[in-house]
Amino acid sequence: NAGVMQNPRHLVRRRGQEARLRCSPMKGHSHVYWYRQLPEEGLKFMVYLQKENIIDESGMPKERFSAEFPKEGPSILRIQQVVRGDSAAYFCASSPLKAGEQFFGPGTRLTVL
Amino acid sequence: AQSVSQHNHHVILSEAASLELGCNYSYGGTVNLFWYVQYPGQHLQLLLKYFSGDPLVKGIKGFEAEFIKSKFSFNLRKPSVQWSDTAEYFCAVNARGSQGNLIFGKGTKLSVKP
């Protein structure tokens, strides 16, 4: 059973560009969580999605950030018009149950020049 | 608001030394508790978890943690560390009955000298 997959592993963007981060959950998992880790900080919750639905986006910045988890395909975290402060590691986790054990992907390290 | 505190930013030990990493949380209700480990260049892996029952929880690789409700603590222990335990350790909680999103501490880097 393959683990949680994230791609790309490293992403470099210039200020003002868009970043798209992908997360493929483990097989059979329909719950996806996105977290962001800033340098020298712990992971911070961003958004929780279940297939086709955003359940909790209380940790998402109000502007420029969006997430989706379509019926088919990976979950996408989209950051429009990136700024230097968006540079961070973005982790996705999946779970077979709401509030169940979460399995983490390897993360995407975003660098904004 | 919920929060998790890990008091040690960086711990350096020699092999065979005993380890205890502190974790305290702030939340008035019932919580689930987790310790995750991130080895260099790898993704987060679950070491152990506490949902209910025996407050002394045993995890993988010889790690254990004890939930002390009165102290809001969930400290991680290992009697004898190895060089391969060099990693970053994260304590996390979520509220029982919540949507499940985890609140993480800032992490503790453990360096074990051979």
Image (cartoon, rainbow, N blue to C red):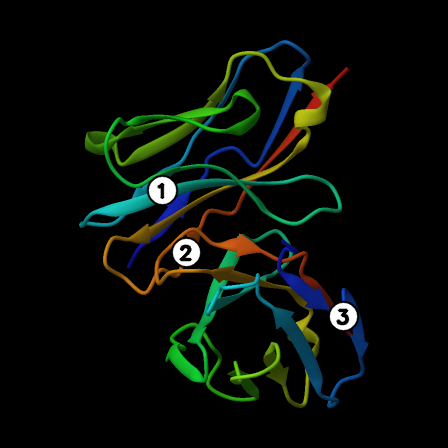
* Subunit that carries the residue with mark 2: B
Secondary-structure class at tag 3: loop
* Subunit that carries the residue with mark 1: B
Is residue A113 in view from this perspective? Answer: no
Image: A67 above or below A31: below
Q: Residues within 10 Å of mark 3 (few under 14, many from 20)?
A: some
Contact check, label 2 and label 1, Cβ < 8 Å: no
**Which residue in the structure is indicated by mark 1?**
B33
Mark 1: amino acid: Leu
Image: B80 above or below B29: above
Q: Is residue B79 left or right of residue B41?
A: left
- Front residue (pair B29, B57): B57
Contact check, label 1 and label 3, Cβ < 8 Å: no
Q: Is residue B97 left or right of residue A97?
A: left
Q: Residue at x 57, y 61 (%)?
A: A26
Rendering coords of residue B67 (x, y %): 30, 30
Q: Residue at x 75, y 89 (%)?
A: A17
Q: Is residue A39 left or right of residue B7?
A: right
Quadrant that contains the N terminus of chain B: bottom left
Q: CA distance from mark 1 to mark 3?
A: 30 Å
Mark 3: amino acid: Pro
- Front residue (pair A82, B85): B85
Q: CA distance from mark 3 to mark 2?
A: 24 Å
**Which residue in the structure is indicated by mark 3?**
A8
Q: Residue at x 72, y 21 (%)?
A: B83
Q: Earlier in the sequence, mark 2 or mark 1?
A: 1
